Amino acid sequence: MDQVARVLQFLAGDPQADRVVPPTGFTVRLTIFTAAAMAFLAVFALALSLATGRLADRWSDALARTATVRISTAPGQLQAQTDAVLEILRTTPGVADARALDIEEQRALLAPWLGPDVPIDDLPVPQLVELTETEDGFDAEALRLRLSAETPGAVLDDHTRWRRPLVRAAQRLRMLGLLSMLLIALTTAAMITLAAQSALAANARVIQVLRLVGARDTYIARAFVRRFTGRALIGAVGGTVLGMLAIAFLPSASSAGGFLTGLGFSGAQWLWPLILPPLVAVLAFWSTRATVLRMLKELT
Amino acid sequence: MIELENVAQSYGGERLLSDISLQLAPGSFHFLTGPSGAGKTTLLKLCYGELRPSAGQVRLFGADVSQMSRDDIAQARRRIGVVHQECQFLDHLPIHENIALPLTVSNRDTTAEAENLKELLIWVGLRSRAGALPPELSGGERQRAALARAIIMAPEVILADEPTGNVDWEMSQRLLQLLIELNRMGKAIVIATHDLNLIRAAKSQVSARVLRLKDGQVHAAGADL
Ligand SMILES: Nc1ncnc2c1ncn2[C@@H]1O[C@H](COP(=O)(O)OP(=O)(O)O)[C@@H](O)[C@H]1O
Ligand SMILES: [Mg+2]
Protein backbone atom coordinates (compact mmCIF):
# COMPACT_ATOMS: atom_id res chain seq x y z
CA MET A 1 0.00 0.00 0.00
CA ASP A 2 2.82 2.28 0.93
CA GLN A 3 4.48 1.60 -2.40
CA VAL A 4 1.29 2.26 -4.34
CA ALA A 5 0.91 5.55 -2.53
CA ARG A 6 4.46 6.44 -3.43
CA VAL A 7 3.94 5.61 -7.09
CA LEU A 8 0.77 7.69 -7.20
CA GLN A 9 2.52 10.54 -5.47
CA PHE A 10 5.35 10.27 -7.96
CA LEU A 11 3.01 10.37 -10.95
CA ALA A 12 0.98 13.23 -9.53
CA GLY A 13 4.25 15.11 -9.33
CA ASP A 14 5.39 18.18 -7.53
CA PRO A 15 5.06 21.04 -9.98
CA GLN A 16 7.46 23.18 -8.01
CA ALA A 17 10.13 20.48 -7.97
CA ASP A 18 9.70 19.86 -11.69
CA ARG A 19 10.41 23.48 -12.48
CA VAL A 20 13.91 23.45 -11.01
CA VAL A 21 15.15 21.68 -14.13
CA PRO A 22 14.81 23.90 -17.18
CA PRO A 23 12.89 22.37 -20.06
CA THR A 24 15.54 21.14 -22.47
CA GLY A 25 13.95 20.90 -25.86
CA PHE A 26 16.28 18.56 -27.64
CA THR A 27 16.68 15.67 -25.22
CA VAL A 28 12.98 15.82 -24.48
CA ARG A 29 12.07 15.51 -28.13
CA LEU A 30 14.62 12.74 -28.52
CA THR A 31 13.08 10.81 -25.67
CA ILE A 32 9.55 11.19 -26.94
CA PHE A 33 10.59 10.13 -30.42
CA THR A 34 12.60 7.14 -29.19
CA ALA A 35 9.83 5.92 -26.96
CA ALA A 36 7.28 6.32 -29.76
CA ALA A 37 9.43 4.56 -32.36
CA MET A 38 10.31 1.72 -30.01
CA ALA A 39 6.71 1.22 -28.91
CA PHE A 40 5.65 1.20 -32.55
CA LEU A 41 8.20 -1.51 -33.35
CA ALA A 42 7.29 -3.41 -30.21
CA VAL A 43 3.66 -3.58 -31.36
CA PHE A 44 4.81 -5.39 -34.48
CA ALA A 45 7.15 -7.69 -32.61
CA LEU A 46 4.30 -8.50 -30.27
CA ALA A 47 1.94 -9.09 -33.18
CA LEU A 48 4.53 -11.35 -34.78
CA SER A 49 4.97 -13.38 -31.61
CA LEU A 50 1.25 -13.76 -31.06
CA ALA A 51 0.49 -14.51 -34.72
CA THR A 52 3.19 -17.14 -35.03
CA GLY A 53 2.05 -18.62 -31.76
CA ARG A 54 -1.41 -18.84 -33.22
CA LEU A 55 -0.01 -20.29 -36.41
CA ALA A 56 1.95 -22.99 -34.63
CA ASP A 57 -1.11 -23.94 -32.60
CA ARG A 58 -3.33 -24.03 -35.63
CA TRP A 59 -0.96 -26.11 -37.70
CA SER A 60 -0.19 -28.62 -35.06
CA ASP A 61 -3.85 -28.80 -34.13
CA ALA A 62 -5.81 -28.76 -37.38
CA LEU A 63 -3.31 -30.63 -39.46
CA ALA A 64 -2.75 -33.29 -36.89
CA ARG A 65 -6.38 -34.29 -37.06
CA THR A 66 -6.63 -34.85 -40.79
CA ALA A 67 -4.80 -36.94 -43.30
CA THR A 68 -5.20 -37.57 -47.00
CA VAL A 69 -5.11 -40.69 -49.12
CA ARG A 70 -4.05 -40.02 -52.69
CA ILE A 71 -5.12 -42.56 -55.33
CA SER A 72 -3.44 -42.51 -58.71
CA THR A 73 -4.29 -45.30 -61.04
CA ALA A 74 -5.61 -45.96 -64.50
CA PRO A 75 -8.79 -43.92 -65.04
CA GLY A 76 -10.93 -47.01 -65.36
CA GLN A 77 -9.95 -48.36 -61.95
CA LEU A 78 -10.22 -45.09 -60.05
CA GLN A 79 -13.76 -45.56 -58.79
CA ALA A 80 -13.15 -49.16 -57.72
CA GLN A 81 -9.96 -48.26 -55.89
CA THR A 82 -11.65 -45.31 -54.22
CA ASP A 83 -14.43 -47.54 -52.96
CA ALA A 84 -11.87 -50.03 -51.70
CA VAL A 85 -9.93 -47.31 -49.86
CA LEU A 86 -13.07 -45.97 -48.25
CA GLU A 87 -13.94 -49.49 -47.14
CA ILE A 88 -10.49 -49.98 -45.61
CA LEU A 89 -10.69 -46.66 -43.82
CA ARG A 90 -14.13 -47.45 -42.47
CA THR A 91 -12.71 -50.50 -40.76
CA THR A 92 -9.50 -48.87 -39.54
CA PRO A 93 -9.50 -48.13 -35.82
CA GLY A 94 -8.84 -44.47 -35.08
CA VAL A 95 -10.35 -43.09 -38.25
CA ALA A 96 -13.46 -41.11 -37.44
CA ASP A 97 -14.58 -40.21 -40.89
CA ALA A 98 -13.45 -40.61 -44.48
CA ARG A 99 -14.74 -38.90 -47.56
CA ALA A 100 -13.74 -38.75 -51.19
CA LEU A 101 -13.41 -35.19 -52.43
CA ASP A 102 -15.69 -34.47 -55.36
CA ILE A 103 -14.50 -32.93 -58.57
CA GLU A 104 -15.49 -29.41 -57.58
CA GLU A 105 -13.48 -29.55 -54.36
CA GLN A 106 -10.44 -30.86 -56.20
CA ARG A 107 -10.79 -28.13 -58.74
CA ALA A 108 -10.89 -25.55 -55.93
CA LEU A 109 -7.77 -27.05 -54.39
CA LEU A 110 -5.88 -27.00 -57.65
CA ALA A 111 -7.08 -23.64 -58.91
CA PRO A 112 -4.51 -21.62 -56.98
CA TRP A 113 -1.74 -23.65 -58.60
CA LEU A 114 -3.04 -24.22 -62.11
CA GLY A 115 -5.39 -21.33 -62.65
CA PRO A 116 -9.15 -21.47 -62.91
CA ASP A 117 -9.34 -22.28 -66.62
CA VAL A 118 -7.41 -25.51 -66.75
CA PRO A 119 -9.73 -28.37 -67.72
CA ILE A 120 -8.76 -30.70 -64.95
CA ASP A 121 -11.31 -33.23 -66.08
CA ASP A 122 -8.87 -34.05 -68.86
CA LEU A 123 -5.86 -34.33 -66.61
CA PRO A 124 -4.82 -37.48 -64.82
CA VAL A 125 -5.55 -35.93 -61.47
CA PRO A 126 -5.40 -38.31 -58.54
CA GLN A 127 -8.48 -38.82 -56.43
CA LEU A 128 -8.14 -37.45 -52.91
CA VAL A 129 -9.76 -39.01 -49.87
CA GLU A 130 -9.82 -36.90 -46.76
CA LEU A 131 -9.96 -38.61 -43.40
CA THR A 132 -10.41 -37.30 -39.91
CA GLU A 133 -8.83 -38.93 -36.90
CA THR A 134 -10.45 -39.73 -33.62
CA GLU A 135 -8.95 -38.44 -30.42
CA ASP A 136 -6.67 -41.46 -30.14
CA GLY A 137 -5.42 -41.29 -33.72
CA PHE A 138 -4.61 -44.21 -35.97
CA ASP A 139 -1.53 -46.28 -36.65
CA ALA A 140 -0.19 -44.67 -39.79
CA GLU A 141 2.35 -47.41 -40.50
CA ALA A 142 -0.23 -50.21 -40.29
CA LEU A 143 -2.64 -48.31 -42.51
CA ARG A 144 0.09 -47.62 -45.04
CA LEU A 145 0.96 -51.35 -45.21
CA ARG A 146 -2.62 -52.36 -45.62
CA LEU A 147 -3.27 -49.80 -48.34
CA SER A 148 -0.23 -50.85 -50.31
CA ALA A 149 -1.27 -54.48 -50.07
CA GLU A 150 -4.89 -54.02 -51.10
CA THR A 151 -4.93 -50.85 -53.21
CA PRO A 152 -1.50 -50.37 -54.79
CA GLY A 153 -2.37 -46.93 -56.25
CA ALA A 154 -3.23 -45.41 -52.87
CA VAL A 155 -0.71 -43.46 -50.80
CA LEU A 156 -1.34 -42.21 -47.31
CA ASP A 157 -0.13 -38.72 -46.56
CA ASP A 158 -0.55 -37.97 -42.86
CA HIS A 159 0.93 -34.44 -43.15
CA THR A 160 3.42 -34.91 -40.34
CA ARG A 161 6.24 -34.91 -42.82
CA TRP A 162 5.65 -31.32 -43.90
CA ARG A 163 3.75 -30.19 -40.85
CA ARG A 164 6.64 -30.60 -38.44
CA PRO A 165 9.03 -28.18 -40.15
CA LEU A 166 6.20 -25.65 -40.48
CA VAL A 167 5.41 -25.83 -36.80
CA ARG A 168 9.10 -25.59 -36.02
CA ALA A 169 9.43 -22.55 -38.27
CA ALA A 170 6.46 -20.92 -36.60
CA GLN A 171 7.89 -21.56 -33.17
CA ARG A 172 11.23 -20.16 -34.27
CA LEU A 173 9.47 -17.07 -35.59
CA ARG A 174 7.79 -16.65 -32.24
CA MET A 175 11.17 -16.87 -30.54
CA LEU A 176 12.50 -14.21 -32.89
CA GLY A 177 9.51 -12.03 -32.07
CA LEU A 178 10.21 -12.33 -28.36
CA LEU A 179 13.91 -11.71 -28.94
CA SER A 180 13.01 -8.58 -30.92
CA MET A 181 10.93 -7.35 -28.00
CA LEU A 182 13.89 -7.86 -25.69
CA LEU A 183 16.21 -6.01 -28.06
CA ILE A 184 13.71 -3.19 -28.39
CA ALA A 185 13.52 -2.92 -24.61
CA LEU A 186 17.31 -2.83 -24.27
CA THR A 187 17.62 -0.25 -27.05
CA THR A 188 14.97 1.90 -25.42
CA ALA A 189 16.80 1.76 -22.11
CA ALA A 190 20.08 2.61 -23.81
CA MET A 191 18.65 5.57 -25.71
CA ILE A 192 16.93 6.97 -22.65
CA THR A 193 20.12 6.55 -20.64
CA LEU A 194 22.03 8.53 -23.25
CA ALA A 195 19.36 11.21 -23.36
CA ALA A 196 19.37 11.46 -19.58
CA GLN A 197 23.15 11.69 -19.55
CA SER A 198 23.15 14.51 -22.03
CA ALA A 199 20.38 16.30 -20.14
CA LEU A 200 22.43 16.03 -16.97
CA ALA A 201 25.57 17.29 -18.64
CA ALA A 202 23.62 20.20 -20.10
CA ASN A 203 22.29 21.01 -16.64
CA ALA A 204 25.53 20.71 -14.69
CA ARG A 205 25.20 24.28 -13.42
CA VAL A 206 21.61 23.74 -12.32
CA ILE A 207 22.67 20.66 -10.40
CA GLN A 208 25.50 22.56 -8.77
CA VAL A 209 23.15 25.32 -7.63
CA LEU A 210 20.63 22.82 -6.27
CA ARG A 211 23.39 21.03 -4.43
CA LEU A 212 24.66 24.27 -2.92
CA VAL A 213 21.27 25.18 -1.51
CA GLY A 214 20.94 21.79 0.18
CA ALA A 215 19.11 19.56 -2.30
CA ARG A 216 19.59 15.85 -1.78
CA ASP A 217 20.54 13.62 -4.70
CA THR A 218 17.13 11.97 -4.69
CA TYR A 219 15.46 15.36 -5.01
CA ILE A 220 17.61 16.30 -7.98
CA ALA A 221 17.19 12.84 -9.49
CA ARG A 222 13.43 12.94 -9.08
CA ALA A 223 13.14 16.13 -11.09
CA PHE A 224 14.93 14.48 -14.01
CA VAL A 225 13.40 11.04 -13.62
CA ARG A 226 9.86 12.36 -13.55
CA ARG A 227 10.45 14.37 -16.67
CA PHE A 228 11.95 11.48 -18.61
CA THR A 229 9.37 8.99 -17.40
CA GLY A 230 6.56 11.33 -18.39
CA ARG A 231 8.00 11.98 -21.83
CA ALA A 232 8.68 8.30 -22.44
CA LEU A 233 5.11 7.47 -21.45
CA ILE A 234 3.69 10.08 -23.81
CA GLY A 235 5.89 8.83 -26.65
CA ALA A 236 5.06 5.19 -25.97
CA VAL A 237 1.32 5.87 -25.94
CA GLY A 238 1.62 7.60 -29.31
CA GLY A 239 3.78 4.85 -30.80
CA THR A 240 1.52 2.09 -29.50
CA VAL A 241 -1.62 3.71 -30.84
CA LEU A 242 -0.03 4.21 -34.25
CA GLY A 243 1.26 0.64 -34.27
CA MET A 244 -2.14 -0.76 -33.35
CA LEU A 245 -3.83 1.35 -36.02
CA ALA A 246 -1.31 0.17 -38.58
CA ILE A 247 -2.05 -3.43 -37.67
CA ALA A 248 -5.81 -2.92 -37.58
CA PHE A 249 -5.71 -1.54 -41.12
CA LEU A 250 -3.33 -4.17 -42.43
CA PRO A 251 -4.88 -5.74 -45.56
CA SER A 252 -6.47 -9.01 -44.54
CA ALA A 253 -4.57 -12.12 -45.61
CA SER A 254 -6.80 -14.74 -44.08
CA SER A 255 -8.67 -15.81 -47.23
CA ALA A 256 -6.04 -18.37 -48.20
CA GLY A 257 -7.79 -21.36 -46.78
CA GLY A 258 -7.44 -20.59 -43.11
CA PHE A 259 -4.11 -22.07 -42.19
CA LEU A 260 -2.17 -18.94 -42.90
CA THR A 261 -2.82 -16.23 -40.38
CA GLY A 262 -2.68 -12.49 -40.70
CA LEU A 263 -0.06 -10.54 -38.78
CA GLY A 264 -2.29 -9.13 -36.12
CA PHE A 265 -4.17 -9.58 -32.92
CA SER A 266 -7.38 -11.46 -32.45
CA GLY A 267 -9.93 -10.83 -29.76
CA ALA A 268 -8.45 -10.35 -26.31
CA GLN A 269 -4.97 -10.24 -27.79
CA TRP A 270 -5.69 -6.60 -28.60
CA LEU A 271 -5.16 -5.95 -24.90
CA TRP A 272 -1.54 -7.06 -25.08
CA PRO A 273 -0.09 -3.95 -26.77
CA LEU A 274 -1.68 -1.84 -24.04
CA ILE A 275 1.00 -3.01 -21.62
CA LEU A 276 3.68 -1.41 -23.79
CA PRO A 277 3.33 2.22 -22.59
CA PRO A 278 3.56 1.38 -18.87
CA LEU A 279 6.41 -0.99 -19.66
CA VAL A 280 8.33 1.76 -21.48
CA ALA A 281 7.60 4.15 -18.60
CA VAL A 282 9.00 1.69 -16.07
CA LEU A 283 12.04 1.20 -18.28
CA ALA A 284 12.54 4.97 -18.54
CA PHE A 285 12.10 5.39 -14.81
CA TRP A 286 14.79 2.89 -13.90
CA SER A 287 17.28 3.82 -16.58
CA THR A 288 17.03 7.55 -15.82
CA ARG A 289 17.19 7.00 -12.09
CA ALA A 290 20.22 4.75 -12.29
CA THR A 291 21.97 7.19 -14.65
CA VAL A 292 21.25 10.30 -12.60
CA LEU A 293 22.19 8.80 -9.26
CA ARG A 294 25.39 7.38 -10.72
CA MET A 295 26.36 10.72 -12.28
CA LEU A 296 25.53 12.69 -9.13
CA LYS A 297 27.77 10.44 -7.06
CA GLU A 298 30.68 11.47 -9.25
CA LEU A 299 30.17 15.14 -8.38
CA THR A 300 31.47 16.71 -5.19
CA MET B 1 28.83 24.62 15.31
CA ILE B 2 31.56 24.61 12.70
CA GLU B 3 34.99 23.56 13.87
CA LEU B 4 38.24 23.33 11.94
CA GLU B 5 41.11 21.49 13.58
CA ASN B 6 44.62 21.63 12.13
CA VAL B 7 43.12 21.81 8.68
CA ALA B 8 45.29 21.93 5.58
CA GLN B 9 44.14 22.31 2.00
CA SER B 10 46.18 21.72 -1.13
CA TYR B 11 45.26 22.11 -4.75
CA GLY B 12 47.16 19.59 -6.87
CA GLY B 13 50.07 19.21 -4.47
CA GLU B 14 50.38 22.93 -3.86
CA ARG B 15 49.61 23.76 -0.26
CA LEU B 16 47.29 26.76 0.06
CA LEU B 17 46.18 26.54 3.69
CA SER B 18 47.99 24.78 6.49
CA ASP B 19 47.33 24.05 10.11
CA ILE B 20 44.23 26.15 10.49
CA SER B 21 42.12 25.83 13.62
CA LEU B 22 38.93 27.79 13.94
CA GLN B 23 35.67 27.57 15.84
CA LEU B 24 32.45 29.24 14.81
CA ALA B 25 30.26 29.39 17.89
CA PRO B 26 26.62 30.54 17.99
CA GLY B 27 26.43 34.29 18.11
CA SER B 28 30.01 34.83 16.94
CA PHE B 29 30.88 37.36 14.25
CA HIS B 30 34.01 36.91 12.15
CA PHE B 31 35.56 38.85 9.35
CA LEU B 32 37.99 37.05 7.09
CA THR B 33 40.40 39.28 5.24
CA GLY B 34 43.49 38.85 3.20
CA PRO B 35 44.74 39.64 -0.27
CA SER B 36 43.09 38.15 -3.28
CA GLY B 37 44.24 34.58 -3.75
CA ALA B 38 45.02 34.12 -0.06
CA GLY B 39 42.42 31.37 0.22
CA LYS B 40 39.36 33.06 1.73
CA THR B 41 36.94 31.35 -0.61
CA THR B 42 38.72 28.05 -0.06
CA LEU B 43 38.43 28.37 3.70
CA LEU B 44 34.70 29.10 3.43
CA LYS B 45 34.24 26.10 1.14
CA LEU B 46 35.79 23.94 3.83
CA CYS B 47 33.25 25.37 6.27
CA TYR B 48 30.22 24.25 4.25
CA GLY B 49 31.48 20.89 3.11
CA GLU B 50 32.09 21.82 -0.51
CA LEU B 51 35.73 20.82 -0.04
CA ARG B 52 37.09 18.06 2.12
CA PRO B 53 40.32 19.00 3.86
CA SER B 54 43.57 17.46 2.65
CA ALA B 55 44.57 17.08 6.29
CA GLY B 56 43.02 17.79 9.67
CA GLN B 57 39.39 17.60 10.62
CA VAL B 58 36.33 19.69 9.82
CA ARG B 59 33.25 19.16 11.97
CA LEU B 60 29.83 20.46 10.95
CA PHE B 61 27.39 20.47 13.86
CA GLY B 62 29.49 17.87 15.59
CA ALA B 63 29.85 15.51 12.62
CA ASP B 64 33.18 14.85 10.96
CA VAL B 65 32.91 15.91 7.31
CA SER B 66 35.03 12.99 6.16
CA GLN B 67 32.41 10.63 7.62
CA MET B 68 29.41 12.44 6.17
CA SER B 69 27.44 11.10 3.22
CA ARG B 70 26.24 13.32 0.40
CA ASP B 71 22.83 13.45 2.02
CA ASP B 72 24.36 14.43 5.36
CA ILE B 73 26.15 17.30 3.66
CA ALA B 74 22.92 18.35 1.95
CA GLN B 75 21.19 18.26 5.32
CA ALA B 76 23.94 20.35 6.95
CA ARG B 77 23.73 22.95 4.17
CA ARG B 78 20.16 23.66 5.14
CA ARG B 79 21.54 24.96 8.44
CA ILE B 80 24.28 27.01 6.78
CA GLY B 81 23.41 29.98 4.62
CA VAL B 82 26.07 30.71 2.02
CA VAL B 83 26.50 33.81 -0.12
CA HIS B 84 28.85 32.68 -2.85
CA GLN B 85 31.38 34.96 -4.40
CA GLU B 86 30.11 34.02 -7.85
CA CYS B 87 26.42 34.01 -7.20
CA GLN B 88 24.83 31.26 -9.21
CA PHE B 89 21.13 31.02 -9.81
CA LEU B 90 18.71 28.96 -11.83
CA ASP B 91 18.54 31.27 -14.79
CA HIS B 92 15.16 30.02 -15.98
CA LEU B 93 13.35 30.86 -12.75
CA PRO B 94 12.40 34.39 -11.60
CA ILE B 95 14.44 35.81 -8.76
CA HIS B 96 11.80 35.32 -6.08
CA GLU B 97 11.69 31.59 -6.84
CA ASN B 98 15.48 31.48 -6.74
CA ILE B 99 15.46 33.07 -3.33
CA ALA B 100 12.90 30.50 -2.16
CA LEU B 101 14.90 27.62 -3.68
CA PRO B 102 16.35 26.35 -0.36
CA LEU B 103 12.77 26.01 0.89
CA THR B 104 11.68 24.26 -2.28
CA VAL B 105 14.46 21.68 -2.25
CA SER B 106 13.88 20.86 1.39
CA ASN B 107 10.19 20.33 0.61
CA ARG B 108 9.08 23.19 2.82
CA ASP B 109 5.82 24.88 1.96
CA THR B 110 6.81 28.08 0.16
CA THR B 111 3.30 29.52 0.32
CA ALA B 112 3.49 29.41 4.10
CA GLU B 113 6.68 31.43 3.93
CA ALA B 114 5.36 33.92 1.39
CA GLU B 115 5.17 36.70 3.96
CA ASN B 116 8.79 36.17 5.03
CA LEU B 117 9.87 36.15 1.43
CA LYS B 118 8.15 39.46 0.79
CA GLU B 119 9.77 41.13 3.78
CA LEU B 120 13.13 39.77 2.78
CA LEU B 121 12.73 41.10 -0.74
CA ILE B 122 11.94 44.54 0.67
CA TRP B 123 14.97 44.40 2.97
CA VAL B 124 17.38 43.66 0.17
CA GLY B 125 15.64 46.14 -2.11
CA LEU B 126 14.52 43.63 -4.70
CA ARG B 127 10.77 43.97 -4.29
CA SER B 128 10.29 45.51 -7.72
CA ARG B 129 12.68 43.03 -9.34
CA ALA B 130 11.09 39.91 -7.86
CA GLY B 131 9.78 38.67 -11.19
CA ALA B 132 12.97 39.30 -13.14
CA LEU B 133 15.19 36.48 -14.31
CA PRO B 134 18.70 36.32 -12.79
CA PRO B 135 20.53 37.22 -16.03
CA GLU B 136 18.54 40.45 -16.12
CA LEU B 137 19.93 41.60 -12.76
CA SER B 138 22.96 43.78 -12.15
CA GLY B 139 25.92 42.43 -10.20
CA GLY B 140 24.79 44.21 -7.03
CA GLU B 141 21.25 42.97 -7.38
CA ARG B 142 22.53 39.43 -7.77
CA GLN B 143 24.56 39.74 -4.59
CA ARG B 144 21.53 40.98 -2.69
CA ALA B 145 19.48 38.12 -4.06
CA ALA B 146 22.22 35.69 -3.03
CA LEU B 147 22.16 37.05 0.51
CA ALA B 148 18.38 36.75 0.63
CA ARG B 149 18.63 33.14 -0.57
CA ALA B 150 21.29 32.41 2.04
CA ILE B 151 19.13 33.54 4.95
CA ILE B 152 15.65 32.42 3.89
CA MET B 153 16.00 29.14 5.77
CA ALA B 154 16.87 31.01 8.96
CA PRO B 155 20.20 29.16 9.10
CA GLU B 156 22.32 28.92 12.21
CA VAL B 157 25.46 30.00 10.40
CA ILE B 158 25.81 32.50 7.57
CA LEU B 159 28.95 32.45 5.43
CA ALA B 160 29.21 35.42 3.08
CA ASP B 161 32.00 35.54 0.50
CA GLU B 162 32.59 39.18 -0.44
CA PRO B 163 28.87 39.96 -0.24
CA THR B 164 29.38 43.68 -0.80
CA GLY B 165 31.83 43.52 -3.65
CA ASN B 166 29.46 44.94 -6.22
CA VAL B 167 27.11 47.14 -4.22
CA ASP B 168 27.38 50.81 -3.33
CA TRP B 169 28.25 51.99 0.16
CA GLU B 170 24.67 52.63 1.18
CA MET B 171 23.52 49.20 0.11
CA SER B 172 26.52 47.52 1.73
CA GLN B 173 25.55 49.22 5.00
CA ARG B 174 22.05 47.91 4.59
CA LEU B 175 23.25 44.36 4.01
CA LEU B 176 25.63 44.63 6.94
CA GLN B 177 22.76 45.82 9.10
CA LEU B 178 20.78 42.75 8.13
CA LEU B 179 23.68 40.47 9.07
CA ILE B 180 24.18 42.29 12.38
CA GLU B 181 20.50 41.85 13.20
CA LEU B 182 20.77 38.16 12.43
CA ASN B 183 23.88 37.96 14.60
CA ARG B 184 21.96 39.50 17.49
CA MET B 185 19.44 36.70 17.07
CA GLY B 186 22.25 34.26 17.79
CA LYS B 187 23.42 33.34 14.30
CA ALA B 188 27.11 32.85 13.68
CA ILE B 189 28.32 35.11 10.87
CA VAL B 190 31.46 34.94 8.75
CA ILE B 191 32.12 37.61 6.14
CA ALA B 192 35.05 37.33 3.81
CA THR B 193 35.93 40.79 2.57
CA HIS B 194 38.80 43.13 1.93
CA ASP B 195 36.63 46.17 2.48
CA LEU B 196 38.18 47.65 5.64
CA ASN B 197 35.52 50.34 5.87
CA LEU B 198 32.89 47.67 6.13
CA ILE B 199 34.81 46.00 8.95
CA ARG B 200 35.15 49.30 10.79
CA ALA B 201 31.46 50.02 10.37
CA ALA B 202 30.62 46.64 11.83
CA LYS B 203 33.03 46.84 14.74
CA SER B 204 31.27 49.91 16.03
CA GLN B 205 28.11 47.85 16.46
CA VAL B 206 29.18 44.29 17.27
CA SER B 207 32.20 42.65 18.76
CA ALA B 208 33.62 41.07 15.65
CA ARG B 209 36.82 39.10 15.41
CA VAL B 210 38.92 39.86 12.39
CA LEU B 211 40.98 37.02 10.96
CA ARG B 212 43.68 37.74 8.44
CA LEU B 213 44.72 35.01 6.01
CA LYS B 214 48.39 35.20 5.15
CA ASP B 215 50.82 32.56 3.89
CA GLY B 216 48.24 29.86 4.45
CA GLN B 217 47.70 30.74 8.10
CA VAL B 218 45.04 32.68 9.96
CA HIS B 219 46.18 35.47 12.24
CA ALA B 220 44.03 37.50 14.55
CA ALA B 221 44.25 41.04 13.22
CA GLY B 222 45.27 43.62 15.77
CA ALA B 223 43.37 46.59 17.13
CA ASP B 224 44.72 48.71 14.30
CA LEU B 225 41.43 48.32 12.52
N1 LIG C 1 39.57 24.33 -7.59
C1 LIG C 1 40.81 24.85 -7.58
N2 LIG C 1 41.83 24.18 -8.15
C2 LIG C 1 43.10 24.69 -8.13
N3 LIG C 1 43.42 25.85 -7.57
C3 LIG C 1 42.45 26.57 -6.98
C4 LIG C 1 41.12 26.11 -6.96
N4 LIG C 1 40.36 27.02 -6.29
C5 LIG C 1 41.21 28.01 -5.93
N5 LIG C 1 42.44 27.73 -6.34
C6 LIG C 1 43.62 28.58 -6.09
O1 LIG C 1 43.74 28.79 -4.72
C7 LIG C 1 44.14 30.11 -4.45
C8 LIG C 1 43.17 30.75 -3.47
O2 LIG C 1 41.93 30.90 -4.07
P1 LIG C 1 40.69 31.50 -3.26
O3 LIG C 1 40.43 30.61 -2.12
O4 LIG C 1 39.60 31.72 -4.22
O5 LIG C 1 41.28 32.87 -2.74
P2 LIG C 1 40.50 34.21 -2.33
O6 LIG C 1 39.07 33.88 -2.20
O7 LIG C 1 41.15 34.62 -1.06
O8 LIG C 1 40.77 35.20 -3.41
C9 LIG C 1 44.18 30.83 -5.79
O9 LIG C 1 45.54 30.96 -6.16
C10 LIG C 1 43.45 29.94 -6.71
O10 LIG C 1 44.02 29.99 -7.98
MG1 LIG D 1 37.46 34.56 -3.09
Image: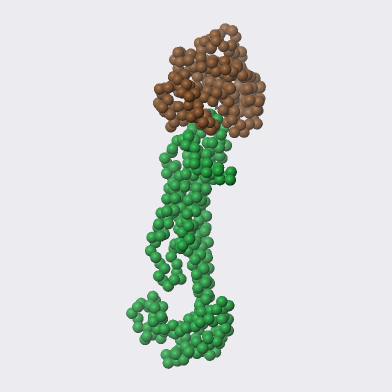
Chain colours: A green, B brown
Near-viewer residue (A79 or A153): A79
The spot of residue A269 in percent (x, y) is 48, 60
Task: Tell me the quadrant of the picture where the C terminus of chain B can be found.
Answer: top right
Residue drawn at x 59%, y 33% is: B71
Left or right of residue A169: residue A254: left
Place of residue A154 in the rendered image (x, y in percent of width and height, measured from the top left) = 49, 86
Please provide percent x and percent y for residue A141.
57, 82
Q: In percent of the image, x 46 and y 71: which residue is there?
A: A259
Residue A87 % position (x, y): 51, 88
- Seen from the viewer's position, the closer of residues B71 and B154 is B154
Locate residue B26 relative to residue A166 in the image: left or right. Answer: right
Residue nearest the viewer, comparing B110 with A191: B110
Q: Quadrant of ligand 1?
A: top right
* Residue found 42% across the figure and 57% down from its top: A244
Q: How many marks?
A: 0
Residue A161 visible in rendering:
no
On screen, A59 above or below A278? below
**Does B180 sit above or below residue A106?**
above
Q: Is residue B116 visible?
A: yes
Q: Quadrant of the N terminus of chain B?
A: top right
Q: Which residue appears farthest toward the left when viewing the image?
A: A117
For the point 41% across and 86% down, which residue is it?
A: A124
Task: Classify A207 as above or below A84.
Answer: above
Residue that lies at the very extreme toward the top in this rendered image: B224
